[in-house]
Amino acid sequence: MRPGIDKEEILGMLTDMAHSLEETDINLHESLMEIREKLCLSHSSQLKETGVFLDRMEGKLPQLIKSELQAKSEQSSLKLELSF
């Protein structure tokens, strides 16, 4: 027996390492795809909820603006009445 590692042993180890890296890369890619899908679904549902909330707020805004305008006009009319 001669000391050291044979060329074939080194090639075998490198080949095994390359296969392990390829398998790890595939697993990582699949895992990231699952995470992306979950995040997209989560963001999509949050956007829908925000859209519904904004639609409700926009529906209430004209009412709030009208009530504020009425309150201001009442205050100004009171001022006018008091000034006469």
Image (tube, rainbow, N blue to C red):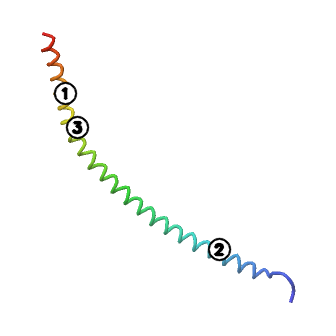
Q: What residue type is labelled 1?
A: Leu
Where does the image place residue 16, in percent across and percent down from the top left?
Answer: 66, 78
Where does the image place residue 73, in percent across and percent down from the top left?
Answer: 16, 23
User: Which residue lies under the disc numbered 3?
Assistant: 61
Q: Label 2, secondary structure: give it.
A: helix
Residue placed at 52% from the left, 67% from the top?
A: 29
Q: Label 3, secondary structure: give it.
A: helix
Question: Which numbered disc, 1 or 2, marks the residue closer to the eye?
Answer: 1
Q: Is residue 44 left or right of residue 61?
A: right
* Mark 3 nearby-residue class (10 Å; few <14, some 14–19, many ≥20): few
* Mark 2 nearby-residue class (10 Å; few <14, some 14–19, many ≥20): few
Question: Of callouts 3 and 1, which one flags the residue occurring earlier in the amino acid sequence?
Answer: 3
Looking at the rendered structure, which numbered label has been put on residue 18? Answer: 2
Looking at the rendered structure, which numbered label has been put on residue 52? Answer: none
Q: Label 1, secondary structure: give it.
A: helix
Where does the image place residue 76, in percent across and percent down from the top left?
Answer: 18, 19
Q: In this view, does 55 lie to the left or right of 1?
A: left
Residue farthest top in this picture: 84
Question: Of callouts 1 and 2, which one flags the residue occurring earlier in the amino acid sequence?
Answer: 2
Task: Depth check: give the residue in front, 66 or 27.
Answer: 66
Q: How far apart are marks 1 and 2 (CA)?
A: 73 Å
Q: Is residue 74 above or below residue 19?
A: above
Residue farthest bottom in this picture: 1
Q: What residue type is labelled 3?
A: Leu
Q: What residue type is labelled 2?
A: Ala
Residue 58, quarter of picture: top left
Residue placed at 28% from the left, 45% from the top?
A: 54
Where does the image place residue 40, in percent across and percent down from the top left?
Answer: 40, 58
Q: Distance between the residues labelled 3 and 1?
A: 12 Å
Looking at the rendered structure, which numbered label has been put on residue 69? Answer: 1
